[in-house]
Amino acid sequence: MTAVVVDSNPKHIFNTVTQGANSTSTTTWNLGRDYVVEVLTIQIPEGHVGLTGIQVSYQGVFIVPWNDGTHFLVGNGLVEKFSLNLYTTGILALTTVNTDKALAHKFYLRAQVREPTAPEVASATVLIPTATLNADAP
């Protein structure tokens, strides 16, 4: 995993995740500090042919794709942009899966971030995983 920060306006943080053949893993993406992630762009290059997938979560809540954690963003030659406007403490979790038995595959990510305002920090939304909400359900 490689993280590169480009200081500009807006600020972008880049990351590359390589997933080995026939495997699944979860890694963290440290953005370096508290940020509001305005837009998250994920590229799944040509050659993945639907054999790979990626999930992005924050504090146990799956934000890309938005689900209960059982689905992955899958594609081939895909570039998707997600408008999030999500205040974070700087750590995102990335889960990748690769069912290709022979080849490793790379995912490319770009986070467009900005500094949070004082009111955003003071009123930061607490994310609660759906499994927690359903724990006491009959």
Image (spheres, helix red, strand yellow):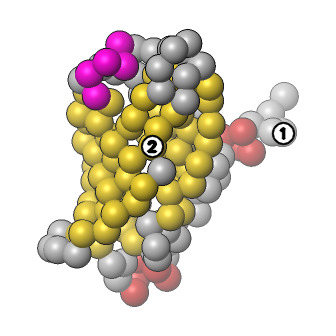
The kind of residue on which mark 2 rests is Val
Position of residue 108 relative to residue 39, above or below, is: above
Secondary structure at badge 2 equals strand
Q: Is residue 101 left or right of residue 113?
A: right
Task: Indicate the quadrant where residue 24 lies.
Answer: top right
Q: Nearer the viewer, residue 87 or 73?
A: 73
The kind of residue on which mark 1 rests is Asp
Place of residue 91 in the rendered image (x, y in percent of width and height, measured from the top left): 53, 63
Can you identify the residue that label 2 sits on?
Answer: 17
Tell which residue pokes out farthest to the front in this image.
102
Q: Nearer the viewer, residue 120 or 12?
A: 12
Using the rendered image of the protein, determine whether residue 29 is visible from the camera's viewpoint.
yes
**Residue at figure coordinates x 53%, y 45% from the top left:** 94
Q: Is residue 131 left or right of residue 124?
A: right
Using the rendered image of the protein, determine whether residue 40 is visible from the camera's viewpoint.
no
Answer with mark 2 or mark 1, whichever residue precedes in sequence. Answer: 2
Can you identify the residue that label 1 sits on?
Answer: 136
Q: Is residue 54 left or right of residue 44?
A: right
* Quadrant of image for the C terminus: top right
Mark 2 or 1, closer to the camera? 2
The magenta stretch is 45-49
Place of residue 76 in the rendered image (x, y in percent of width and height, measured from the top left): 30, 19
Secondary structure at badge 1 equals loop
Position of residue 30 relative to residue 77, above or below, is: below
Q: Residues within 10 Å of mark 2 (few under 14, many from 20)?
A: some
Task: Indicate the quadrant where residue 117 lies.
Answer: bottom left
Q: Residues within 10 Å of mark 1 (few under 14, many from 20)?
A: few
Task: Decide whether residue 78 is among the magenta residues.
Answer: no
**Residue at figure coordinates x 58%, y 63% from the top left:** 126
Q: Check residue 104 in the rendering and tell me which mark sits there, or answer none.
A: none
Task: Indicate the quadrant where residue 49 lies.
Answer: top left
Place of residue 21 in the rendered image (x, y in percent of width and height, measured from the top left): 55, 22
